[in-house]
Every structure is written in structure tokens, then in C-alpha cells.
Amino acid sequence: MLENFLSHRLSRDNAEKITIDEVINGQSESDDVADSVRKRLKDAFKTFKKSWQNARRLVEDELGGAENVPFLDEFSTVSMCLVDSKKSGRYLYTALKVNKIVMFGPFLID
């Protein structure tokens, strides 16, 4: 859902600066967010956040405990929700790479 919503409107560098809350509430470079879309994004993010909090330890274990994998909340940057082998997206990349997390809900994929 997030990827479809943003439709490549944010560069990876901008995703490191803009918070999830700013995207959901239409305060970023993206267009204004309609109430129905805002509700869908909020609900989907809630599911994603819960799944991520459950997955954090698995990712920390996979990284050998060398890093403290961050918690995720509305004030995290959008980059935490992108799959990337570098920067903040490396945590989600690691989770998917080791195939330990089956589903994060519709926040990522709609």
C-alpha cells in the first residue's frame, strides 16, 4: 500500500528524512491525503508496526546482535518501510531475506 501510494514520488534520500506520520497526514512532498486513504494507511501501518515489533528480535539475531534494531512508530522515517540492503531499509531487507517474517500486512503490499 505504501509503495502504491507513494508511486516513486519520494527518492530514497527523501525517504530518510520524511516520517511515516508526515506521509499519512499529507505533510510531505506527496499529495494531500483523502480521509479514506488516510484511514487505510493508518490501519495498515498499525498492522505493519505490530508485525515489525514482533520481528525485531529475529532481525537482531540474524545480524548477530551487532546492532540494535530500531523500534518502529509513526515518527520513524519512511525508509524503515522500504526494502533496501543499505541504510534504514536494511532491517526489513534482512527480515525478508531470511524468510522469517511471512507477512507485514497490507501496509507494504496492497
Image (tube, helix red, strand yellow):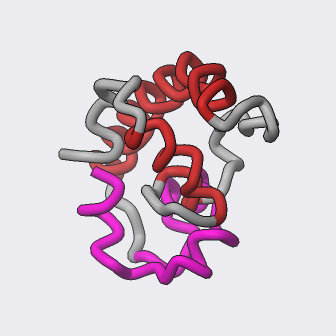
29 on left or right of 106: right
Viewer-proximal residue among 79 and 86:
86
Residue 51 falls within the magenta-colored stretch: no
30 on left or right of 55: left
- Considering only vertical position in the picture, is 75 above or below 14? above
107 on left or right of 90: left
Give percent across and percent down for residue 1: 27, 50
Find residue 31 and report its image quarter: bottom left
Viewer-proximal residue among 83 and 108:
83
Give percent across and percent down for residue 17: 69, 71
Give percent across and percent down for residue 63: 66, 37
Report the residue at 57% width, 61% height from top: 79
Viewer-proximal residue among 27 and 72:
72
Q: Which residue lies furthest to the top in this view?
A: 54
Residue 20 falls within the magenta-colored stretch: yes
Q: Which quadrant: the C terminus?
A: top left
Report the residue at 34% width, 79% height from top: 8
60 on left or right of 27: right
Q: Give the range drawn in magenta.
A: 1-30
Q: Residue furthest front?
A: 64
